[in-house]
Amino acid sequence: MPTAAILAENLCKSYGEREVLRGVDLEVVEGEIVAFLGPNGAGKTTTIEILEGFRTPTSGSVRVLGQDPQHAPRSWKEDIGIVLQSSRPLRSLTVREVLRMQAAYYRKPREVASVLELVGLVEQADRRVGKLSGGQQRRVDLGLALIGDPRLIFLDEPTTGFDPTARRGAWDMIAGLRLLGCTVLLTTHYMDEAQHLADNIVVIGGGAIIARGTARELADRVRARTRISWTAPQPVGLDLAVTVIDGRFSVELDDEHEVTNVVHRLTGWAMESGMPLADFEVVRPSLESTYLSLVEGVGA
């Protein structure tokens, strides 16, 4: 039976008469990367700050690595790594010096050389933090979170402001945390990032969890449809509702087996008739469209 790294049950938080969390239930299994998604004001930050021990819930129970964050010992704190949305390590120090300074707070830190290699900053180890690029500074942030050899890492929008190349590099680095045995709770506004990295996705809206599962499971929940489209000299008899716009044919399906069947029939027709299927595309529902369907009409 998998062990829960995070287990929150009926978590509520109010500020006076304003109810921010309304019975949040959240479970993250050890070794998972879970994306925690929701619009601004949905309750993400409040939930995470409670899990990290920075806020006290009004009611409900919380266990993070088996402990109540409000009463956890120092050893628990050393098992937690946090990467904030933005941070400012001492810019006048070198990367190596910043990591060494952070390591001094832990009883059993990782070796600085090991962390430099993990976050891809070996060549920048003796450069001052203030001279690094934005992507490299974000790697320093992750290095500071890893130096204590944590079991659980909170990542708050880790690639905001990155160019595409830097984002892909960060994705590889985050995915590599699995190999270290880390559990990761990730917040992001980039749906492709969540889809690429996360084993499971949790969506919060209006202070309550409104959906959870894999990207495919969430798409099935909202009956998101796969679109098959092609250009051909003449119609293909599919006995389906085919849309034709400027000579381009398309059909939308919500059943995976039917998608496979239609693709097989189309390619078979093309081979038998000798007619080309130009610009043939199978576009599966994106996590972004699924997410927008889930949060539509849900209050922040």
Image (cartoon, rainbow, N blue to C red):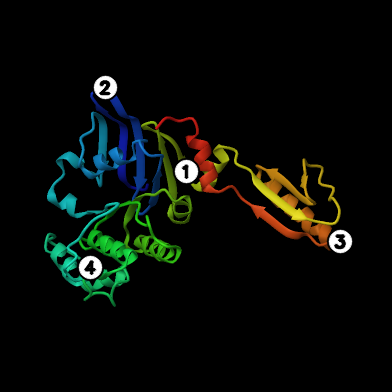
Q: Are marks 1 and 4 in contact (CB under 8 Å)?
A: no
Label 3 close to label 4 by CB (< 8 Å) = no
Q: Amino acid at mark 4?
A: Val
Residue 272 image label: 3
Query: Percent position (x, y) of residue 59?
Result: 25, 28
Residue linked to disc 2: 17
- Secondary element at tag 3: helix
Q: Nearer the viewer, mark 2 or mark 1?
A: 2
Disc 1 packing (10 Å; few <14; some 14–19; many ≥20): some
Within-10-Å neighbours for mark 3: few <14, some 14–19, many 20+: few
**Residue identifier under label 1:** 213
Dot 1 falls on a residue whose secondary structure is strand
- How far across and down, in percent of the image, does residue 54 sit? 20, 42
Q: Residue at x 38, y 63 (%)?
A: 170
For the residues bearing labels 2 and 4, Cβ distance under 8 angstroms:
no
Label 3 vs label 2, nearer the camera: 2
Label 2 SS: loop
Rendered residue at 19%/65% (across/down) = 91
Q: Earlier in the sequence, mark 2 or mark 1?
A: 2
Q: Which badge, 3 or 2, is on the more N-terminal residue?
A: 2
Q: Are marks 3 and 1 in contact (CB under 8 Å)?
A: no
According to the image, label 4 marks what residue? 129
| Percent coordinates x, y for residue 129 in the rendering | 23, 68
Q: CA distance from mark 3 to mark 1?
A: 41 Å
Of label 3 and label 4, which has the lower sequence position? Answer: 4
Query: From the viewer's perspective, is residue 50 above or below residue 284?
Result: above
Kindly check if marks 3 and 2 are in contact, taking CB atoms under 8 A apart as contact: no
